């Protein structure tokens, strides 16, 4: 029996984006343990175990970071997994180094699969973080990734070619030990178009993401204020509160904002998408492929998104949606207003672009089955631990 350990910095992220991979691994007969930070998880479904460990997601925290290294090392030496899947940057570095050390001590995993869903605020080439502490952090991350990449059996996956090419260009990884897997996978049996899509009396525009300014929520609210009192357009905000993120947008401000309808955290996203006309993600964040854009395409809903890597994988400008030039919140709000005015002037454009997005989803490798199969192959394949360049 193959023993696999999955380590992710946040339990909510794991449940939304990676649970289906674990369930498929269990179906193959693998013995799976999942270790996450974030909120303690309810008792998992039969077939896999869960352990909770505090992980500081937003900055380096010497005490918690050291605890993660020690906890990972103890787990690897005790449980002796054949493979580990490290998701997001902190587990990649801290648990990755622990896995290599466990090998030196005679009980480390043969396979170490590192998944970088997006480069985020620290590692993105477009990052504006220029403090000395941030430069030091990037330098330490670069050194750690180069070291891990040089170890046998260590592999990396990215959601976009641009992210992978950035790390290749910087010499952090090799072409032989990295590949691209398109997003986290969306289930077309849950996300599908409304059966009676027609031109609505008012256009409903949805922002659905973490409630962060860097996700463009500030620009979205500013654009909504422009249309305040206009019965032809409605602005909806759905998302998760990030109470400890310094970039958070306070939910109490959204609750008081008359220009938008704040839905809070929505648990039936497929149904919500079947009842909106446009999805908007004016992100300034180092995205992978934003899941909400894939879900929108599967639901035949066109998207407004920033002209950034990741977003371009789903939003083809003028075909499946509209790409907005990156800029400060005011500039992005102005671009959103211009795009929304174009949709209001030609409501049939929503239907045409929605159908194009659906075709793109169906022809791409964005479905949950395709994505899951690639991760399972990398973790349980009995042959040599090699990857195609992808």
Image: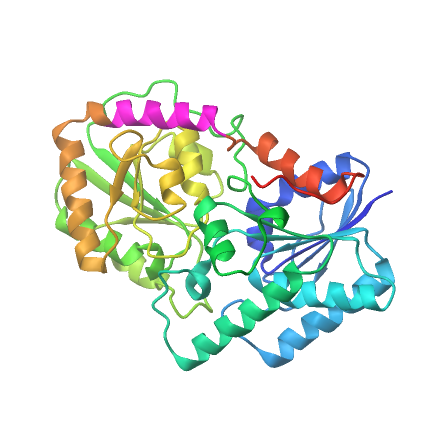
The residue under the point 43% across, 48% down is 162
The residue range painted magenta reads 350-364
Q: Is residue 84 left or right of residue 259?
A: right
Front-most of 16 and 167? Answer: 167
Q: Is residue 316 left or right of residue 67?
A: left
Q: Residue 100: x percent and y percent?
A: 75, 64
Front-most of 293 and 169? Answer: 169
The residue under the point 64% across, 80% down is 63
Classify 371 as above or below 379. Answer: above
Q: Magenta stretch: residue 362 in it?
A: yes
Count all numbered tags in the image, as a single digit. 0
Q: Residue furthest top?
A: 196
Q: Is residue 113 left or right of residue 293?
A: right
Q: Magenta stretch: residue 210 in it?
A: no
Colour scheme in use: rainbow
Q: Residue 110: x percent and y percent?
A: 79, 53
The residue under the point 29% across, 62% down is 253
Front-most of 332 and 248? Answer: 332
Q: Is residue 256 left or right of residue 51?
A: left
Classify 112 as above or below 345. Answer: below
Q: Residue 257: x percent and y percent?
A: 24, 56
Classify 290 as above or below 123. Answer: above
Q: Which secondary structure is most common in the magenta stretch?
A: helix
Q: Does residue 72 appear anywhere in the picture?
A: no
Viewport quadrant of the C terminus:
top right
The residue under the point 62% across, 39% down is 388
Res 39 → quadrant: bottom right
Viewport quadrant of the N terminus:
top right
Q: Does residue 330 appear anywhere in the picture?
A: yes
């Amino acid at each position: 029996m193959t023993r696999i350990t999955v380590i992710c910095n946040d339990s909510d992220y794991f449940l939304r984006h990676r649970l289906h991979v674990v369930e498929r691994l269990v179906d193959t007969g693998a013995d799976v343990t999942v270790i996450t930070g974030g909120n303690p998880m309810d008792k998992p479904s039969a077939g896999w175990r869960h352990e909770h460990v505090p992980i500081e997601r937003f900055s380096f925290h010497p005490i918690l970071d050291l605890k993660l290294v020690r906890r990972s090392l103890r787990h690897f030496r005790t449980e002796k997994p054949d493979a580990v899947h490290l998701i997001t940057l902190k587990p990649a570095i801290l648990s990755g180094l622990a896995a290599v050390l466990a090998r030196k001590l005679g009980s480390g995993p043969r396979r170490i699969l590192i998944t970088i869903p997006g480069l985020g605020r620290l590692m993105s080439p477009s990052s504006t973080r220029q403090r000395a502490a941030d430069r030091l952090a990037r330098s330490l991350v670069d050194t750690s990734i180069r070291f891990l990449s040089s170890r046998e059996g260590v592999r990396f996956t990215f959601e976009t070619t641009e992210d992978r090419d950035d790390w290749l260009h910087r010499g952090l990884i090799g072409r032989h030990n990295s590949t691209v897997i398109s997003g986290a996978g969306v289930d077309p049996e849950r996300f599908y178009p409304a059966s009676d899509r027609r031109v609505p009396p008012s256009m409903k525009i949805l922002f659905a993401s973490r409630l962060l300014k860097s996700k463009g929520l500030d620009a979205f609210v500013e654009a909504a204020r422009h249309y305040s009192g206009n019965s032809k357009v409605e602005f909806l905000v759905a998302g998760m509160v990030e109470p400890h993120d310094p970039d958070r947008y306070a939910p109490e401000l959204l609750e008081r904002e008359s220009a938008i309808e704040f839905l809070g955290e929505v648990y039936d996203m497929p149904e919500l998408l079947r009842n909106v006309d446009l999805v908007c993600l004016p992100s300034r964040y180092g995205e992978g492929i934003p899941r909400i854009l894939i879900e929108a395409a599967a639901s035949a809903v066109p998207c407004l998104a920033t002209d950034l890597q990741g977003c371009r994988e789903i939003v083809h400008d003028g075909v499946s949606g509209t790409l907005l030039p990156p800029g400060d919140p005011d500039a992005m709000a102005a671009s959103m207003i211009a795009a929304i005015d174009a949709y209001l002037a030609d409501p049939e454009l929503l239907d045409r672009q929605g159908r194009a997005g659906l075709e793109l989803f169906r022809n791409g490798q964005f479905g949950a089955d395709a994505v899951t199969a690639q991760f399972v192959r990398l973790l349980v394949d009995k042959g040599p631990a090699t990857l195609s360049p992808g």
